[in-house]
Amino acid sequence: MKNAKQLTALLDLEKIEENIFRGNNFQAPWGAVFGGQVLAQSLHAAYQTVPDDRFAHSMHAYFILRGDISTPIVYDVDTIRDGGSFTTRRVVAIQKGRPIFNMAASFQLKQEGFDHQINMSKIPPPDDLMTDVELAETWEGELPKLFKRYRSERPIEFRPVENHDPFISKKRKPYRNVWFKAKGKMGNALSLHQTFLAYASDYNLLGTALLPHQKHVKYGEVQLASLDHGMWFHRDFRMDEWLLYSLDSPSASNSRGFTRGNIFTQDGKLVASVVQEGMIRKMKKKE
């Protein structure tokens, strides 16, 4: 995928029956279904069953099985509750008759209420930074296979604030900041921007949990897999304008890494928060 238009097409699901939808897969260079795709498609499926005046405020998901990139995914939406202010949906993603993912999402009417937020840190603006692809070119010779993942065309552009070379053995603090936005202009529907953000939110999380351990292991020697993912939408935003993903990893233990992220607009408005736990395990050396 090259741009926002192509990602929009990927997220557009086929309706099979009432509350049942089918989606195709992005042919990721790593050969497995990308977790962000399933997050975004499941949110889009839920959106097809809620009133037009309600918008997602939270979603909580579990990745159950590795998705087969060659097989379409069926999304079964359970319309759990339609309340006066809140609407609740449960979505199960299915391949070959087995659940590979499930999610609960809550939608709300726009309402007046109290308002506060934390401040965004002082961060260099995206125009002063290189893209992750440009940074990766500086270590292409270390592992060409891994570089191919960076070089593959994506609908989201990322500009890391910190240049963390994964091939330098160094213990780092578990903090990082990444600017990102969709490639190309998008329509105005908030639901579309939220599904795009769900897609992009699966990037950069587990890598943050690895930063304190780079003295002992390189990225190419680690097995990574998302286990669960929580996301809250606080305020309106646009995915075709720069957003800052400010990440930290408070803990890693028992082969799991835990990471949090706050997402800000360029003028400092907090628009979303994310948490994820994933498996991070050193690969066993072949005899």
Image (spheres, helix red, strand yellow):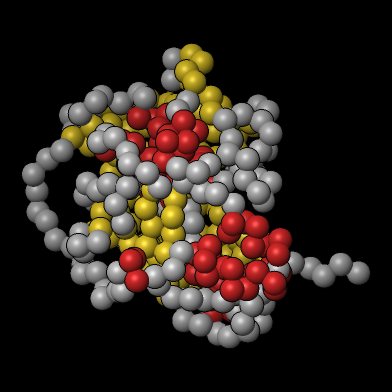
Residue 7 spot, x, y in % from top left: 46, 38
Q: Is residue 221 above or below residue 22?
A: below
Task: Name the residue: 48% across, 76% down.
Answer: 163
Residue 101 spot, x, y in % from top left: 55, 40
Task: Name the residue: 49% across, 21% down.
Answer: 14
Residue 112 spot, x, y in % from top left: 8, 44
* Residue 281 located left or right of residue 20: right
| Closest to the observer, 90 or 198 | 198
Q: Is residue 162 above or below residue 45?
A: below
Task: Name the residue: 50% across, 43% down.
Answer: 2
| Location of the C terminus (image quadrant) | bottom right
Residue 166 spot, x, y in % from top left: 60, 74
* Residue 251 located left or right of residue 218: left
Task: Name the residue: 44% across, 68% down.
Answer: 130
Can residue 95 be seen? yes
Q: Outermost residue toward the top?
A: 17
| Closest to the observer, 140 or 177 | 140
Q: Outermost residue toward the right?
A: 287
User: Quadrant of residue 3 in the image?
Assistant: top left
Label count reads 0
Can residue 282 be seen? no
User: Quadrant of residue 40 in the image?
Assistant: top left
